[in-house]
């Protein structure tokens, strides 16, 4: 399989487990400012989802002594597809083994990418069933839309930092069957950024280079809103709620996403974004490669990338 | 394969061939009002595409003595996938055979649905290569966006009329490997409408019941814009250009699409639509079934469905 | 002074006192669904305002045995301007006399229009002073924007029903110094609708013909949102909150307002609207007159005016 | 009259005469990229207007050996009001005298502000009469909306540079009867910026400090679009048309305008903006004063003001 040929074994990004050392403030942010809904809790974690996420959770917020991401989960297209992926991952020597899952899903196979981030893949899932009070007016959406805070619709993607994005570029397609839709390759040959997708979204995970000498760090998680105007409204909501806005709203040159980046109270970066009607429908899409020169132009409308975008990750580097 | 399990052999809707008995006026509409770009012409047809459609054409506009749709084309995910679909279609007894293709794509296998609409599936395609003047500022889109007229981004879906939608509900998943995302089933058991998808879009083809005693008619073709605001702007553009607006802008209850329907000069219905960030990511999505009672509520915000929506199709019934 | 020459004595529409026989449900609607903020209460009334209304209140919601409007208030440009208006109204024989005002403003001069609606004009007002918790992030807006419900920004206009709009067309400019920006005049000479403004907004009050044999009825009050997209969002919010949507979202031909009409729980009609950047800056604007024929085309994009729009007013006719 | 009490003698900003040393390229920009319409030409100038500007022109583009602004025109509310303003200006010792006007308007009284910018005020104007081809579908707008390029609706405001904004703060209200809605006053007492209005718009002219030792320079002219989404679309249009984007889209803290700044081909700065539903309706609005400390926070959502915004004006400083 060439890197750009679709594999389809993995259906979509499922969830991100985020660590916070300010659990109450982080929860307040995700529920009342970003607009997520709580599905349940266990000892250290709160399970959260956006109003049109169909699974029990898409964000697992876990109290910890630090910040960053504990793991990322992807859902397979079927049980057979899951088994194919496990075999592929084992042949890469990256596998850890099976876990029992949690409140949100069934058995999950765990592995690590080449930069020490923990992944899991699963098929059996706990679909969200709305209570009477949460039943939507239109039965073809997961839950009543409360239009609370930024009112994000669904989990969109995440971004991880890696020391060697070139190695990741080999690993992710091999492990997940992802296609590489876009990448940044510097004149030196260094892969500065790489965007992957398992489906028609233009990306569900991105990696960018960590300029510190650290592995396994987290850059951001992104929730999608339906319209660009809602990204602008989110900016006003963050402003009124004293949320630190790092950069945006603006439009990325890479992937053309309309973006807005903030830090939740514990310091993890969160993005609210809109991709318009852009999808990757072409089954033999050729990877778009951006050069060092091209990236010097900044974002689509000329905004220079803010310095902290290259340095701030979680957990912080000691 | 259950009706809702993804098959992935077909990648996406490729193009629609529309017949017009007012070819000059229709072309003027599609280029200057809807905002499509011409890729080329042959004896009777003009090949058109939206600015982010990656193939040579997504709309083939063909001069004729009548109106309606001559054929619809779907692109397969690979050559092997194409062959799997051909075998499936032949086993259904619906196949016609191979054609050489046209300016837009290579060899195509033709077949008919149970209501006498002509389909073709193909893999080899003629990807659009922008001339110097049409090169976009951002290299990850197909063509320069001229923001001309309604400025639609890409082909989205089509809707066909059928005498027996129940038969179609069996046929399309068997032929294309599509999933049924939503349907309307009346108390009598009649399937009044059915929405199908081969990928993560919530539908690429829909069928609704033809109340006349006719087969093979066309309801509408839809192009997507990036934002709901652009659907509103399109309404203003249609108003200023004397284009007949049938209904909308409003939001469908079924599929929640934000819609606007007009008739191009020859009478074929065309939709400009926006789906927000709604996608079908769930690989085991359960079909949403709307009852007769539920559909009496009209569209999402209460607009009653206009009578002509149930009666106007092309070609007109004698 | 010709009808269209600006007078400037009256600065703007100040507030509407609305009667409700379901005070708790109406209050819940205005606060949690429309997004107004409560400034205070007295025995029978709750004083409400939108987040960028600078006065203490723009909607006074009063418990009553019936529905409709008790009075409408306009603020004068200065004390001297107020006195000029009082003299003009007295010379029309329409004056009632001075009241002490209420929690929201100082002494007000009361009068009735030719259809028995109660008006008051005042200059001294109680400007809203936000508490610490309600202080906005940007000091040039009246209050923190909570983005709650439809999140309306400010009072925009009201619409009253009248048996004889022709008489009103003479009265309002004479009493308030308003200009007539648009009107509907039927072939019979009947004035079917008339739109007035005292400032650069294209209207602050409109009158339309009451087809019942009744005086003094109320048609609707309107709050403005910043963007058309927010009118669409409001439609979704009304849908999720079981609020009856009468018609819209759509664009009026008259005044080009992008509108959405609902009934609050007691039956009073409420509009959420956006006018874009449209203003009447021309000091000698000529009244736009719509004919009976022109109005048969329906709204801007072809929506036919819903029947209840001509019949539903408050209080209901016995 | 206090500085904030409305005077109303001046109705609105009428037009700006802009100098260009690249007249053909500038004209191409204003017509095809910004979307203005040409009303006529004389020896050195082209008269342009936006599709809902009611006068013959709002931008007079004049070929010259340099760039910048030749004059700004304001329209009075009536002939009597014009005469009151002439008397006031003469008493300030700032008057120059009467000119005959041009294609766009009748006799105009000329004067200079304290920083050597040329102004004129007039009442008699040449209202735009659309040809048959330019007649709008809705008779209550000035012209057919072609939705060409950025598709701006109307002239909004202009911004001038001045050595001594403190002197300007005295002069403009005295000359035009404007109110000061917002200002920036540094700890030293220096007035760094000042925003004035003659009507309900929150400003029609702004002055900011010129850090070079120069008088009479021009900062930018602004055209309004109906929706924030159209500012975003304008950014895409500028990107595709190689127009230099200086900064934005973003939201100003001062006045809360949603802005986008570009340089037209000759180097004059042009803004496309949207103010939402924000108006100054309060007749005794108190000037909002921003401190040096407050302005260090940058724009509303945290964007730091770009350096060239403080240094780039036209004509360039030798």
Image (cartoon, coloured by chain):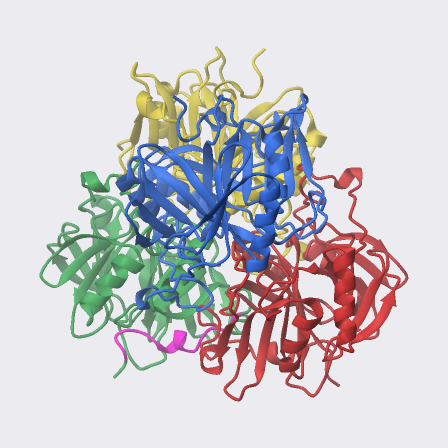
Chain colours: A green, B yellow, C blue, D red
Residue at coordinates 64% horizontally, 25% vertically from top-left?
C190
Tell me the chief SS of the magenta region.
Answer: loop
Q: Quadrant of the N terminus of chain D?
A: bottom right
Q: Residue at x 50, y 35 (%)?
A: C160
* Lateral position of residue A41 relative to residue D304, left or right: left
Q: Nearer the viewer, residue C16 or B219?
A: C16
Taking the magenta stretch, the answer to whether it contains residue A308 is yes
Q: Position of residue A14 (x, y in %)?
A: 26, 53
Q: Residue furthest right?
A: D43
Q: Residue B24 location, x and y as percent?
A: 72, 31
Q: How many marks?
A: 0
Taking the image as drawn, is residue A310 in sight? yes
D88 vs A70, nearest the viewer: D88
Q: Nearer the viewer, residue C22 or D258?
A: C22
Q: Quadrant of residue C286?
A: top right
Image quarter in which the C terminus of chain D is found: bottom right
Residue A162 found in image quarter = bottom left
Residue A243, above or below C288? below
Vertical comparison of C61 with D191: above or below: above
Q: Is residue A295 magenta?
A: no
- Boundaries of the magenta span: A303-316
The image quarter in which residue D240 lies? bottom right
Specify whether C122 is left or right of A91.
right
Furthest toward the left, the residue is A43
- Describe residue A264's horizontal placement relative to residue A100 as left or right: right
């Amino acid at each position: 399989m060439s890197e750009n040929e679709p594999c389809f074994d993995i259906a979509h990004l499922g969830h991100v487990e985020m660590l916070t050392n300010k659990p109450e403030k982080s929860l307040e942010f995700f529920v009342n400012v970003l607009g997520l809904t709580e599905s349940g809790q266990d000892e250290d974690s709160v399970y959260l989802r956006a109003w049109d996420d169909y699974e029990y959770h898409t964000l697992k917020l876990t109290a910890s002594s630090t910040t960053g991401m504990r793991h990322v989960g992807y859902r397979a297209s079927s049980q057979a597809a899951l088994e194919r992926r496990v075999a592929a991952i084992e042949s890469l020597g990256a596998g850890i083994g099976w876990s029992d899952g949690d409140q949100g899903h069934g058995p999950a196979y765990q592995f690590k990418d080449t930069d020490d981030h923990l992944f899991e893949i699963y098929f059996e899932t706990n679909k969200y069933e709305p209570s009477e009070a949460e039943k939507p007016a239109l039965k073809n959406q997961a839950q009543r839309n409360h239009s609370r805070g930024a009112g994000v619709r669904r989990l969109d993607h995440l971004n991880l930092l890696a020391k060697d994005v070139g190695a990741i570029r080999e690993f992710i397609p091999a492990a997940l069957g992802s296609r590489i839709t876009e990448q940044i390759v510097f004149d030196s040959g260094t892969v500065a950024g790489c965007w992957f997708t398992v489906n028609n979204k233009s990306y569900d995970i991105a990696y960018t280079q960590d300029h510190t000498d650290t592995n396994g760090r987290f850059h951001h998680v992104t929730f999608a809103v339906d319209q660009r105007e809602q990204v602008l409204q989110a900016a006003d909501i963050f402003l009124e709620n004293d949320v630190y806005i790092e950069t945006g709203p603006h439009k990325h040159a890479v992937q053309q996403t309309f973006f807005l980046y903030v830090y939740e109270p514990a310091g993890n970066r969160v993005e609210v974004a809109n991709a318009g009607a852009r999808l990757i429908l072409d089954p033999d899409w050729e990877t778009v490669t951006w050069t060092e020169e091209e990236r010097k132009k900044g974002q689509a409308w000329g905004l220079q990338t803010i310095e902290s975008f290259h340095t701030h990750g979680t957990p912080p580097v000691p």
